[in-house]
Amino acid sequence: SATDGFDSDFPSQINFIEFDEKAYRAMRDDPRRTPKFAKAIRSRLAELQDAVVLDLGTGPFCVLALIAATAGAKKVYAVEANPEAARRAKAFIAKCEDPNASRRDVDGLVPLKPGAIEVIEGFSTELTLPEKVDLCVFEICGSLASEEGLYATMKDARERHVKRPDDPATYIPRRCQTYAAPVSYALHNLLTPPSYDWSKIVGKDPIRFNCRDEALQVLAEPQLLEDVDFSKPLPSLPASVKTSLTFPVTTASIANAQKGFERAFAEERQLQSLLLDEQGKKMDAAATASVIGAKLSGLAMWPTLVCDGSEGTLIVSRGKNGEAQKSHWQTVLQLMSDEPLSIGAGDSISFDFEAKPEKA
């Protein structure tokens, strides 16, 4: 799932992805995410009068719903499937509506007129709203665009919840994308048997990383792997979505990876502690970086959200060239072999990818 590795504070719900308190706050406070959502929502609502808005997966803080309500929406329906998150969302909105509530006592409180936001508990695929909406806002894009039930949820929203399903301006974001690139993973190179047996996880569940983890270095220019456009018909479910990509390896891309590993060895203590050979002798960081910067571990994937088509509202979890940066999303790595494979400038690396989105 999109949240492997998270521990949940909420009651166990086995039929949908859930987040813990830390994850909800990370999403809310992500400076590369929330301000751009706000800019796109405010810009769109400035063009509409008496707009009705749907927020899918509003969470306990109703972040996007509050942005829409304070930007002039006549009504916002905030849908949340997690019972505990929905309960907290209702309590939070009640405090926002209370003229006596204090910002000192309520984290994230925004003064709100009663009835502007209606929190509805349940799956949007199982609900019938009182009316169709002018604008649908959401952030149900996982570390891969096709995670978190995106296809099923948005196919249903197109068919039942929005007034103009074929209009790109109906959705924020209007597209969810996954970018991918071949990478070298430092630990895959430095932790060798018997210290660690990578065959235990190759071909199984992917490894998930903080997007600012420099232990992962890109070996070729990233390419678009998934591009889900909500203004166009989505496939009937269950479906199979296939893509094939070929990545040319260049002298410059290998040099960038080697420099990235040099930087990581200089800055990250965990990696420094692994710079030991079989006899326990300290290895030269620059020489090691040069070697592992020309080794293939697998395919890394990460999300990008196209809010309204403008560069100023593009939400990226990694840099344009796959550089590490802070993000609440994770980077997903699918290892391709037990041991890293040697590569060189002029090589091409090809991958076949298949996503199998299912019904909600």
Image (tube, rainbow, N blue to C red):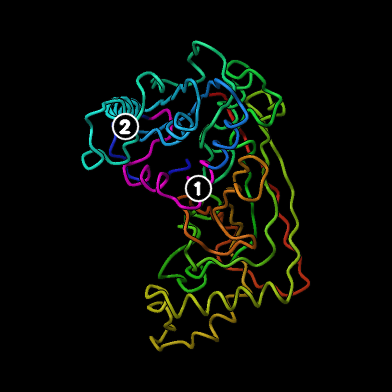
Q: Is residue 132 above or below residue 261?
A: above
Question: How dense is the environment of label 2, judged by Cα within 10 Å: few (below 14), some, or many (20 and up)?
Answer: few
Q: Percent from the top left, x then y, of residue 69? A: 45, 28
Relative to 279, 246 lies left or right: right
| 36 drawn magenta | yes
Q: CA distance from mark 2 to mark 1?
A: 27 Å
Q: Which of these two is toward me, 54 or 239? A: 54
Q: Position of residue 345 (x, y in %)?
A: 74, 74
Tell me if residue 194 comes above or below residue 288 in the rendering.
above
Q: Of all residues shown, which one is farthest toward the right?
A: 346
Q: Which of the 4 image quarters holds residue 229?
A: top right
Give the answer, above or below, for where 305 lies relative to 294: above
**Badge 1: how crowded within 10 Å, few (<14), some, or many (20+)?**
many
Which is more foreground, mark 2 or mark 1? 1
Q: Earlier in the sequence, mark 2 or mark 1?
A: 2
Quarter of image, res 94: top left
Asked if residue 278 lies left or right of residue 259, the reply is: left
Q: Left or right of 63: which side holds 177?
A: right
Q: Name the element at disc 2.
A: loop
- Report the residue marked by disc 1: 33
First to last magenta residue range: 14-38
Q: Position of residue 324 (x, y in %)?
A: 53, 63
- What residue is pinned by disc 2? 12
* Tag of residue 171: none
| Residue 261 against residue 41 in the figure, above or below | below
Kind of residue sitting beneath label 1: Arg
Q: Residue at x 61, y 57 (%)?
A: 299
Q: Residue at x 49, y 32 (%)?
A: 71
Looking at numbered disc 2 in the image, what kind of residue is underneath it? Ser
Residue 308 percent across, percent down from the top left? 64, 39
Q: How many marks?
A: 2
Secondary-structure class at tag 1: loop
